[in-house]
Amino acid sequence: MNLPNPNSVEFIINLVSVLLLALGIKGLSKVKSSKVANRLAAFAMFLAVVGLLSKYLLNSDGGISLSSWFWIIIGTVTGSLLGAITAKKVPMTSMPETVALFNGSGGMSSLLVALGEAIFNSNFNNINNVNIFIGIISISITIFVGSITFSGSIVAMAKLQGWLSTPNWTQNKFRHFINISLGIISLIALIDLIQNWNINSIWLLVIGSLLLGIGVTLPIGGADMPVVISLLNSYSGIAAASAGFVVGSQLLIVAGAMVGAAGLILTQVMCKGMNRSLVSVLFGGTLASQSKTSAGGGEYTNITSCSVEECALSLEAANKVIIVPGYGLAVAQAQHTLREVTKILEENDIEVNYAIHPVAGRMPGHMNVLLAEADVPYEQLKEMEIINPDFPATDVVLVLGANDVVNPQAKNDTSSPLYGMPVLDVQQARTVFVVKRGMSAGYSGIKNDLFDLPNTSMIFGDAKNVLSELITELKGLGVGSK
Ligand code: NAP
């Protein structure tokens, strides 16, 4: 391990970037400070690149050749451009696959750093030296975790993008035998590498752990996929922290540790929100394959559909309204139209709040970000535990493109795959309007008992179109012109 001299410019710049990164990550926890915090973290990363290059610029490392400078500049410019284009172009609904791709890139970078150091640094034969021994352990762990992260993330991205489906044979218990065998092979290679620095074991470790990443991720599907992505995010942090020990970068060690810990916490939050244990996510197969064998399906028997006009009349007469946003609202990009509707209601002294379920949408915080984009006041966004007791005293609930998160089966039907998942108790309100395009199921693929209840009316249509019509109807009724 090669830590920089504490008196060097590189060390000081690294230290400043670590502090700025930590401040940036802290700021991300609040909506108000998140924009500035994001820029601060990005600036910290830029500073880190400058810090690394400073040792070559100031010649404290003997300098590097012109061709190396050429490749460093090409790499930095290409990476920055790709990052900026992706950030601008990718819609919010495709964020999980983008995160998966970024995790995979992180895993691959750590893997390549460790491989480069293992192959081109000849010092590793002296295992008795403590520094070299730490280097060998770091290289081995980085290769192991980096490979799993890379291959697992690419599989996850391909599945979310619809390029890859879950093969039937991976739902068979035989997959555990294959994965355990791959795990044992990787472990043997890892131990051999640490004990004997046998360079051939590196390739066995790379192949074994790449296949293990594929083998573990391929059987997982449905609603569990974002949980796996969050877990892979954590792995990418662990790989980066370990790569930090390989190249002696405090920034990589600290940033990687923060990502590793944050990813683990997020994984736990998501598992809790979906009432799934991490073990059942990783080893239980797809949720869809479980739903086929359990209850939760069945036909609808009591669907009432209504017009936008009827909904407008109920809203006009209401004192208290709760909006439940879901994935469909994001798909329809209807957040701004929704804000116009709620402004009209508020002008008529109708109390409006938004019920935010922890896993509404396709990633944690999806709905908060979506509504913040439309300038919905943050105080009106109420978390599930806070707003659930308010439903019995609510006149109208407007469910917009949400499905699983309002399914009463999660509380009432012990045989449902959703049973135990905390949900919003919208059925306790006086009237519930559900806006969706048809009767298709939500992410879990099961029937929603809410739609059959007598106080529920369905309004079929794209969320944005329905909300636009609602504005016209409300204005026609004179609502908002008080
Ligand atoms: P959901 O259960 O996936 O339901 C979304 C509904 O939106 C669908 O029923 C769909 O019905 C409707 N829809 C789609 N496009 C629409 C449009 N343009 N206009 C109107 N409606 C539209 O969504 P959710 O209630 O938000 O639940 C999230 C699900 O994702 C949960 O199962 C959760 O466990 C899972 N998940 C979330 C996270 C997370 O972190 N947020 C992580 C992992 C898993 P139609 O096709 O009939 O319109």
Image: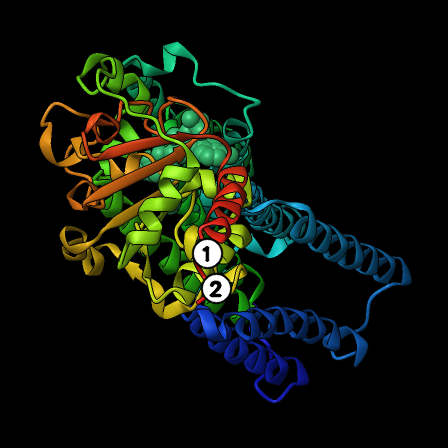
Q: Amino acid at mark 1?
A: Gly
Q: Residue at x 35, y 52 (%)?
A: 316
Q: Is residue 447 left or right of residue 129?
A: left
Alpha-carbon span between mark 1 and mark 2: 6 Å
Q: Residue at x 53, y 21 (%)?
A: 164
Can you identify the residue that label 2 sits on?
481
Report the image quarter containing ligand 1.
top left
Q: Residue at x 76, y 59 (%)?
A: 76
Can you identify the residue that label 1 sits on?
478
The numbered dot on residue 294 is none
Q: Is residue 208 visible?
A: yes
Q: How many labels were placed on the picture?
A: 2
Q: Is residue 299 left or right of residue 138?
A: left
Q: Is residue 192 left or right of residue 271?
A: right
How was the colour assigned to the protein in this rendering?
Answer: rainbow
Q: Position of residue 53 (x, y in %)?
A: 74, 71
Q: Amino acid at mark 2?
A: Ser
Q: Is residue 106 left or right of residue 194?
A: right
Answer yes or no: disc 2 within 8 Å of ligand 1. no
Question: Are the residues at dot 1 and dot 2 in contact (C-beta closer than 8 Å)?
Answer: yes
Q: Nearer the viewer, residue 362 or 49?
A: 362
Q: Nearer the viewer, residue 170 or 197?
A: 170
Q: Residue at x 61, y 71 (%)?
A: 39
